[in-house]
Amino acid sequence: MKILLLLEATLGGTGRHILDLSDGLLALDHEVHLVYSLVRADHAFLSGLAALRKKEPRFHCESTAIRRSVGISDIRSYLELARYVAREGPFDILHAHSTKAGFLLRLLISRRGAAMVYTPHGLMTLNHELRGPSRWAVSVLESCLARISDAVIAVSGVERQCAIDTGIPAEKLTVIHNGLNFAHAPDMERRDTVRARLGLEAGTVCVASIGLLVANKEPGRLLDAFAIVAGKTTQPVCLLVIGWGPLEADLRARAAALGIVDHVRFLGQVSGIEYLPAVDILAHTSRYEGFGYVFLETLSAGIPVITTRVGGADELIESGVTGYICDPWNSEEFAAFLLRFIDSPEQRAAAAVPARARAEKSSATVMVSATAGVYQSIRQPQKASVNALKDRLISRNPQ
């Protein structure tokens, strides 16, 4: 098949997903074109893209400037996309990833016979704070565009239910979980080396948060819970905040106000996988998201997860075994869950085997295969109709 992938949100999990999907589809001998935006691209996406281009000379990719917010620049982005489809097509599949890409690609006037797929990677309506006219407008737009899509892929059960509540027809929906490329999994044999680099003493229990420092990730919640932990445990503890974003200065001030500044380290824009070997517990406090890759990375390292109820949590976390889900949010309860693992090295050790076993079920290979299956299922009827037309023409004019 000849496939066009479009992505605006070239950072974090969506950036990881698009690179793994491209790599996997190329390995299946499909022709893959990637059109991506550089506006929000992070280092991990750019370095991963460079590696994939070097590995696969058959890979077609082109950058553009798609912005997250709606504006006059969308007209230029739309025209550039339309020209690319006209110049490089016809395609069998057009697959939009992220909300903005989904709007632009599905509004194309001419698809030239291509089937349309949309993966939101976290519908806007997952955010319960989106209310009133804004929520209504987003729901109407998503439901209308879904009806001109051939398939919509949700990355978790939570996102699928949200999609149905938003007005997306259930028959259009397929759930395909994000999958981990185990070649990029954390190297736990480097635990002592990484902890030494961080200056962590042997008995220190290391809690980590990995993600962008933005509003929907609610990193301030973790500082509140960790302050409770630091006041109750007799164990030496450390909190690693791995990530970057506009809230960093406020978070540093909040840590100082809570009296935990000596226990908290802000590592900035570094690889979470690089530092996971030093970690004993992952803490995740987001309000919403589609399906966090950080869960898979952490579980593949045999590390328990304490999280709020976001996409992927129900599918991956077994309560009391591989972690806990704190729902609804309560800083005291979240701290209590952390303390169960902090104060019990035996429980942390017992989580390792089931955590790794669960992560192994969600591989990038499975994700790519399932996605290619969706492509094939929506492409085959089109091919069948074309073949039937050819047969009729041949029967009428055998010469």
Image (cartoon, rainbow, N blue to C red):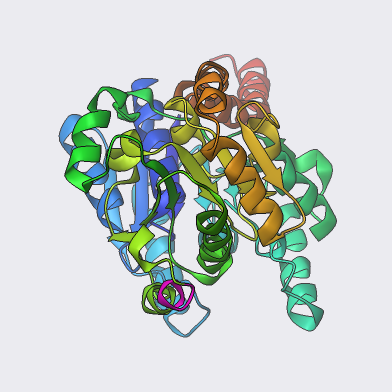
Looking at this view, name the residue that lies furthest to the bottom.
72
> For the magenta stretch, what is the residue range?
254-258
Residues 362 and 94: in front is 362
Write the residue at 47% across / 31% down. Answer: 303
Q: Tell me the chief SS of the magenta region.
A: helix
Q: Position of residue 156 (x, y in %)?
A: 67, 40
Q: On screen, 70 above or below 231?
A: below
Write the residue at 68% across / 30% down. Answer: 320
Q: On screen, 141 above or below 359?
A: below
Residue 169 is left or right of residue 324, and the answer is right
Question: Magenta includes 257?
Answer: yes
- Quarter-of-image position of residue 126: bottom right
Looking at this view, name the residue that lies furthest to the front.
234
Q: Position of residue 108 (x, y in %)?
A: 55, 61
Residue 374 is left or right of residue 67, and the answer is right
Residues 218 and 168: in front is 218
Write the residue at 28% across / 59% down. Answer: 269
Residue 187 is left or right of residue 108, and the answer is left
Q: Position of residue 118 (x, y in %)?
A: 60, 49
Number of marks present in the image shown: 0
